[in-house]
Image: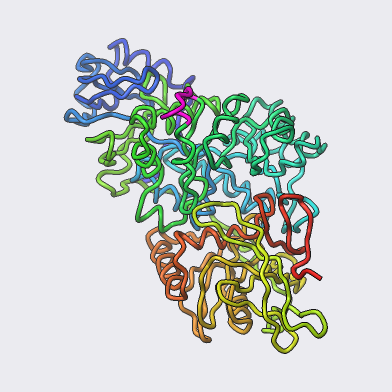
Amino acid sequence: MTHAPFQSWAESAPRLIAVAAGRAPADTVIRGGQWVNVHSREVLPGHDVAIAAGRIACVVPDAAYCTGPDTQVIEAGGRYMIPGLCDGHMHIESGMLTPAEFARAVIPHGTTSMFTDPHEIANVLGLPGVRMMHDEALMQPVNIFTQMPSCAPSAPGLETTGYEISPEDVAEAMTWPGIVGLGEMMNFPGVANADPAMLAEIAATQTAGKTVGGHYASPDLGPAFAAYVAGGPADDHEGTCEADAIARVRQGMRAMMRLGSAWYDVATQITAITEKGLDPRNFILCTDDCHSGTLVNDGHMNRVVRHAIACGCDPLVALQMATINTATHFGLEREIGSITPGRRADVILTSDLVTLPIETVIARGRIVARDGKGLVDCPHLHWPDAARNTVHLGHALTAADFDIKAPEGANTARANVIGVVENQAPTRALKADLPVRDGLVEGTGDVCQIALVERHRATGGVTNAFVSGFGYTGAMAMASTVAHDSHHMIVVGTDRAQMALAANRLAEVGGGITIFRDGAELALVELPIAGLMSDAPAAEVARAADRMMAAMRDCGCTLNNAYMQHSLLALVVIPELRISDLGLVDVRTFEKIPVLET
């Protein structure tokens, strides 16, 4: 069953007024619930919600006066009526799913509004890819708002992407119906240094009256941060400690606190509210990156709200940070984010505000999920062949492509090593003295090899370096065409032959994630769309992702959601060390550094 085109407030206003006044019957009435009012931060028992044309007509103690013989009555039975949950910053591609399948996965968890930045596909397919994401998003029975990606490449001069986003692309996208702003401005040094292209993108967004997303991944809260804020970004999700959250809200930004599959940044920042007493209306909860396994097994924004409450946050404040705060930030307070007249009728029925069971989900006035089961169709776009044929290596790789040659006559070599940090996006810049065998530098102990394989233009390029923190043992390799943000191919392994097998396998299937050990494939997640997403059902993708995570553990990795750590190792805008197709990058200085020190 597909959903009908959704009416604007202007189109539905006469009917809303007639229902509220009692001159016409409501389409639907939610009867006998406890109204969680996120504007006043109150729980008001004994209220009904009257709905017409997919919007809320009125919230009153007794809606019998606008209930007709054909009105659908949903019995709340004394349960809490809370607004549908909003994710203030996220990347659909991180779920390994298309917008339709992502919506299908999260609707039963109570997410009815998402603010998505499709900069992953922008790096692979450019503006046409963004348009595909935007168009499928608008087909869904819930609200998926798109932010136009700002940084492809994320750090010009330090990586090469499949496509580049220009200020002209941004200006064009601002005219599309589902665009609500500019995606996270990751090139924070560019903004702080008044780069003309970055400022042109921000200016085009502000001229269109839309919101500029931020991304300030630096601990420096001095002049560089001040310059970045002056450049226009209105929010930031890269904070990892209380001082970060406080600094952002004091400068007029919204602090977005994220709980994704691997990012656990709520507990360390929410003390700005729970202990320091800052105004919570300037804080927003988000996920940033959740893979399909998390969505299917653990939840989405309901998981984040529960976590915030477990961290000591008042449940009503936590709900504000996942509803009205988000809507207000994007200029959509009159459309979403609360159970009040004129807004889209996005309502959750739950029997407890702390454990937050998602019992009934109503979106645009229709029941879309009940007791964890989706009840609505999520239409698919036709994804063309150009979106499904994106892995081009140039030639079949061999073990020799992953050789790291030692200095002449050396028995050991001192290497710069990327150090993975569990549950955090930043890495550490480490050094290690590594053994040399047959003229090649080898990983040892917890240090293994990492390679960035160019896959957009078939150059055959392979950049090699070292990484630590995964704990892999035996002869193994893991490869992924999800490699934020350039989305070449990341290969991590302890054995060069296994690395070649894994890379060639992904070229064969058109993208995804694979793990090899001793010449055998342990797990494969096929992601044929841009090498980033699958249009298969979320549960099916999640099962493949679960097998992949199990294979990582079988190879010795004990990190929480280590796949997310793997996929971020090429993100050259988050300190400290990253790998790109151009070399090893020190993000503290935004300069390339040698893998081996002389």
Quadrant position of the C terminus in the picture? bottom right
Q: Where is residue 324 in the image (x, y as percent from the top left)?
A: 44, 26
At 40% across and 42% down in the image, what residue appears?
A: 304
Q: Position of residue 526 (x, y in %)?
A: 51, 68
Q: In this view, does 416 lie above or below 445?
A: above
Q: Where is residue 548 in the image (x, y as percent from the top left)?
A: 45, 69
Q: Where is residue 465 in the image (x, y as percent from the top left)?
A: 69, 70
At 44% across and 31% down in the image, what residue appears?
A: 321
Q: In this image, 235 relative to 163: left or right?
A: left
Q: In this view, does 309 lie above or below 62?
A: below
Depth order, front residue of 33/501: 501
Depth order, front residue of 236/368: 236
What segment is highlighted magenta in the picture?
272-281
Q: How is the image coloured?
A: rainbow
Which residue reaches farthest left?
77
| Residue 1 among magenta residues | no
Depth order, front residue of 386/298: 298
Depth order, front residue of 493/100: 493
